[in-house]
């Protein structure tokens, strides 16, 4: 009688107090050992302890996803410690949550290049690190968090909207290209303020500064549950969440 293999390790790139930790908890509840990757190492002991208290085996690795060499080294360290990666979640937040983008009418080449290099290139690099092994084993999952501006025109977001669209196109095309391989790629398209995250904390700490943006928010636990549904059911390449009406 054959048995299903136990879940392999899952990596959460861009682990933060909001959606990243919610995804980590959901993957941990499913039996995955979770490796957290983020640039803020000072938070890591708290994250690992929080997951351990919930029965999730976790480790943490410091790397800024925009530094491709550091990202590669972190993913190598995860594989050395836990074994071949079975699930990759890629969802780094903004480098500077308080920075306001230039609108699309003032977007220039350098701004677009910086946005794409800072968000899309790291996603492609992370996939390049883990996908060959997944294809060889015939199983695995790749999940990405992207912005609603990749699907709905949002001129005030300027270059960020361009990078969101590029990421969305990459993930949806990757999903199609992986058909029949046993490996899945899916996208969480998010529009609005995600509770407990750094941007949520910044906005709620300054009432009135950002208008009514905090009036309607998204629950990261609900998004994480939907992410798990995408990963396990594999019927759709994308799930969309919007608090913007």
Image (cartoon, rainbow, N blue to C red):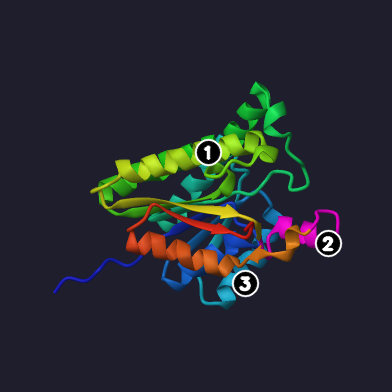
Calculate the distance from the C-alpha at mark 3 to the C-alpha at mark 1.
34 Å
Q: What residue is shown with label 2?
A: 205
Q: Nearer the viewer, residue 17 or 202?
A: 202
Label 3: which secondary element: helix
Classify 181 as above or below 56.
above
Q: Residue at x 77, y 42 (%)?
A: 99
Q: Nearer the viewer, residue 101 or 156?
A: 156
Q: Earlier in the sequence, mark 3 or mark 2?
A: 3
In the picture, which quadrant includes the C terminus?
Answer: bottom right
Q: What residue is shown with label 1?
A: 165
Label 2: which secondary element: loop
Calculate the distance from the C-alpha at mark 3 to the C-alpha at mark 2.
24 Å
As drawn, the residue found furthest toward the front would be 245
Is residue 206 covered in magenta? Answer: yes
Disc 2 packing (10 Å; few <14; some 14–19; many ≥20): few
Q: What residue is shown with label 3?
A: 50
Is residue 196 covered in magenta? Answer: yes
Label 1: which secondary element: helix
Does the rendering let one see residue 67?
A: no
In the image, is 95 to the left or to the right of 78? right
């Amino acid at each position: 009688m054959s048995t299903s293999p136990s879940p392999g390790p899952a990596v959460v790139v861009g682990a933060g107090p909001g959606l990243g930790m919610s995804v980590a908890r959901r993957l941990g509840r499913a039996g995955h050992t979770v490796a957290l990757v983020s640039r803020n190492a000072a938070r890591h002991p708290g994250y690992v302890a929080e997951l351990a208290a919930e029965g999730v085996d976790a480790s943490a690795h410091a790397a800024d996803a925009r530094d491709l060499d550091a990202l590669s080294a972190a993913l190598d360290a995860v594989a050395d410690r836990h074994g071949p990666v079975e699930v990759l979640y890629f969802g780094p937040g903004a480098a500077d949550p308080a920075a306001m983008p230039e609108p699309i009418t003032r977007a220039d080449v350098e701004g677009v290049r910086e946005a794409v290099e800072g968000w899309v290139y790291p996603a492609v690099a992370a996939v390049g690190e883990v996908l060959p092994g997944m294809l060889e084993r015939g199983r695995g999952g790749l999940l990405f968090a992207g912005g609603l501006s990749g699907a709905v025109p949002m001129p005030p977001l300027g270059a960020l909207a361009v990078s969101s669209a590029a990421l969305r196109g990459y993930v949806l095309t990757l999903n199609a290209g992986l058909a029949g391989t046993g490996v899945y790629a899916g996208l969480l398209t998010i529009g609005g303020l995600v509770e407990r995250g750094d941007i949520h904390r910044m906005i709620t700490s300054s009432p009135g500064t950002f208008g009514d943006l905090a009036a309607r928010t998204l629950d990261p636990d609900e998004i994480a549950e939907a992410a798990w549904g995408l990963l396990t059911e594999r019927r759709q390449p994308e799930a969309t969440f919007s608090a913007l009406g």
